[in-house]
Amino acid sequence: MTEATVQNAGQLVTSDQFLDFIFAGNATITLVSGRTGKRYTYKVAKAKDSETMFFLSAMTGPDNTSDFEYLGFIKRPYGSSQRGQSLLLAGKKGKPTDVRFKGFAYVLDAAYWGDMPADAIVYHEGKCCRCGRKLTTPESISSGIGPECAKK
């Protein structure tokens, strides 16, 4: 395995990979800013009885299975959509001023137009090879083992 393969483990590099993954119905991804290094973890879940509506939540605490807060919804476009018109909407309980909302909207909108941002790194959900829990930090996704299990 080459160093490039190891570095790209768990990454969604193209806009098609990103869109296919988040619109699969039950996705967890981690976005990392290439400029600041900050990372945010999101869940995208398909609404029941809908092929076009998805709910977005962001991780807000240390429990990567339950500490998620609703941010907004994505109405998956079919046909034409205007560039600059965001696919992510806040809804009644959403927070469009939240940095996590803005970051996801930035990547989603760019990916929809085929321009995956060079300053954003996207990691897909992974599971620990030891305990089976979801992995959300880039280092854990790359290695395939969570930080607690790595200590054992």
Image: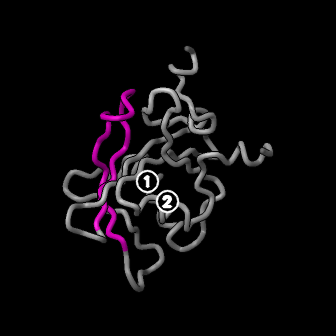
Q: Nearer the viewer, residue 16 or 94?
A: 16
Q: Quadrant of residue 55?
A: bottom left
> Residue 103 in the image: x percent, y percent?
47, 52
- Residue 73 in the image, given as x and y percentages of width and height: 30, 60
**Going 57% across and 66% down the picture, which residue do you hit?**
15
Pointer 2 and pointer 1: residues touching (CB < 8 Å)?
yes
- Look at the picture and state if 143 lies above or below 43: above
Judged from the image, the secondary structure of the residue bearing numbered disc 1 is helix
Which residue corresponds to the image point at 42% horizontal and 32% vertical from the top-left?
Answer: 133
Q: Which residue is mark 2?
A: 106
Q: In the figure, is residue 114 to the left or right of 118?
A: left
| Residue lying at the far bottom of the rendered structure | 79
Q: Nearer the viewer, residue 3 or 15?
A: 3
**Placement of 51 over or under 33, stated as above or below:** below
Query: Which element is circle 2 on?
Result: helix
| Span highlighted in magenta in the image | 53-76
What separation in Å lies between label 2 and label 1 (alpha carbons)?
A: 6 Å
